[in-house]
Amino acid sequence: MMERAFSLISLVLIGTGLISPTLDYTIFKKERLVSPYLTLGGLGFSGIILGVLAVWSYGRGSVSIYGGMLQIEPFGIFLSFVATIGAILLTVATLSEVKNWSTSPSLYSLVTLGVLGSYFLVSVGDLTLLIAAWALVSVISYVIVGLRKDRASVEAAGKYALMGVIASIFILYAVAMVYGMTGSTSLRSISDLATGEGALIIMSSVFFISAFGFKIGLVPFHGWLPDVYGKAHPILIVFLTSTATVAVVGLIVRVLFTLAPLITSYWPILIGLISVFTMTFGNVTALIQNNVQKMMAFSSIAQMGYIFAGMAAGPLVAGGLTLQGIALHLGSYSFAKAGVFVFLAYLLKKGLSLQISDLKGLGKSMPITATAFGIILLNLVGIPPLLGFWSKFYLFSAAAKITPWLTLIAIINSGISVGYYVRPIKSMFFEEGSDLPDERIGDFEQATVIAASFLLVSGGLVLPSLISILIP
């Protein structure tokens, strides 16, 4: 059943991704009616099938399909569902303005195919499929960033592609080392075939971490991220934060948790130091930003640092707790960043320049949207009972099992983040502005921001009690 269900999802998403732009570029060239709604239909269908798979796979553990190329397990299904919801939020947000872009049919096609690539990444069981899925999601990400075709977006796409090429080279080096050492490309057999903490194991782990670091913005591989997240059109960044990043972190867990038992002497300090530098740099740099989009770009770096705090101990001591924390945090991150960047796109549409000062008085002129945005920011801080609080609680608890010093630093960093997350809230609700835009009930961007905040509130109330069932 599992193999047939996954094949059905693949056929639906590939068909949607290929047919919808063809129809909109030919038959419906003026109206552009097909692509967004076919995309929503395909993503919705995939989400339903994933839900069925989650129920069917309960208690079965990891199920191998396609000759071991994919390993379907609860953690991967959960992340696939999160990536799908992120893509749905993006698609809904584009229904007012973006669907009229000349490149919009291509955007919907790329999003659909990118979601399929994310499914492969979070469930990959073989290094050959890893390379193929990595290339698919990477190329789609580069193209999406530049789809607006303005100077800033094209420049951001170029920088992103350059860094992506470097990351892909590191991936190839790492795969070559692992294959040369074990003679196998199967992730399941690598830990059995490899022995000891040999130089090749250590080097391949370093190359994998470097490649993944480039992709999700870990320090010191983060150089591209502020330019891409801070300059490209905000609505295009939603795919990177809410789908692509979820997939890459899922891949990190698949690969690095396989290698971690082979480098137990180095793992906690290596991953812990990366976490400290990443979260500290992200938070401190965000603290001095006056442009909200750039602030959220550096915030994204810090959020990856929190995930690595949980990873530092996860595969060695607290594997289940770490996986639950990572899953919750990726849900929190995906929904929150979708809401943040859609809100910024909404403000751009209304003629604002996204400086902190531009937010003054929005709590009065746009009360519903501003309140939803405020909830999203509080979630990123980690205020209970929002989902962001529980995800940090799980991650920091996992880190405390073996690296209590890392938990302390992570808590301090969360305190630092309050300093910049409250600035937009203060401007919106406690400062007066002039020439303020108003909100129109029914705008798709507004609906997306509200939906994202609702997911964070409801997720915080429901998921903590279910996560141990969803991801044993």
Image: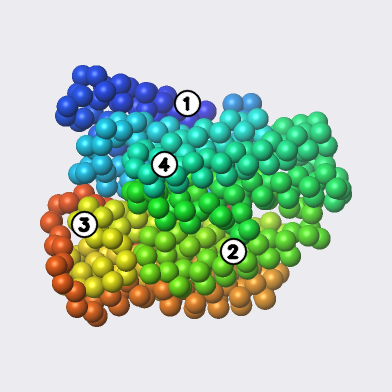
Image quadrant in which you'd find residue 220: bottom right
Q: Residue under circle 2? A: 278
Q: Nearer the viewer, residue 72 or 303?
A: 303
Q: Residue under circle 1? A: 7
Nearer to us of marks 4 and 2 is 4
Q: Earlier in the sequence, mark 4 or mark 3?
A: 4
Image position, residue 359 (x, y; %) = 26, 69
Nearer to us of marks 2 and 3 is 3
Q: Nearer the viewer, residue 32 or 470?
A: 32
Image position, residue 54 (x, y; %) = 46, 43
Q: Residue under circle 3? A: 351
Q: Earlier in the sequence, mark 4 or mark 2?
A: 4
* Crowd class of label 1 (few under 14; some 14 to 19; many from 20; radius 10 Å): few
The reply to whether discs 2 and 1 touch (Cβ–Cβ < 8 Å) is no
Q: Residue under circle 4? A: 154
Q: Earlier in the sequence, mark 2 or mark 3?
A: 2
Instruction: Tell me the kind of residue under disc 2.
Output: Thr
Q: Nearer the viewer, residue 326 or 108?
A: 108
> In the rendered view, does 257 fall on the left or right side of 434?
right
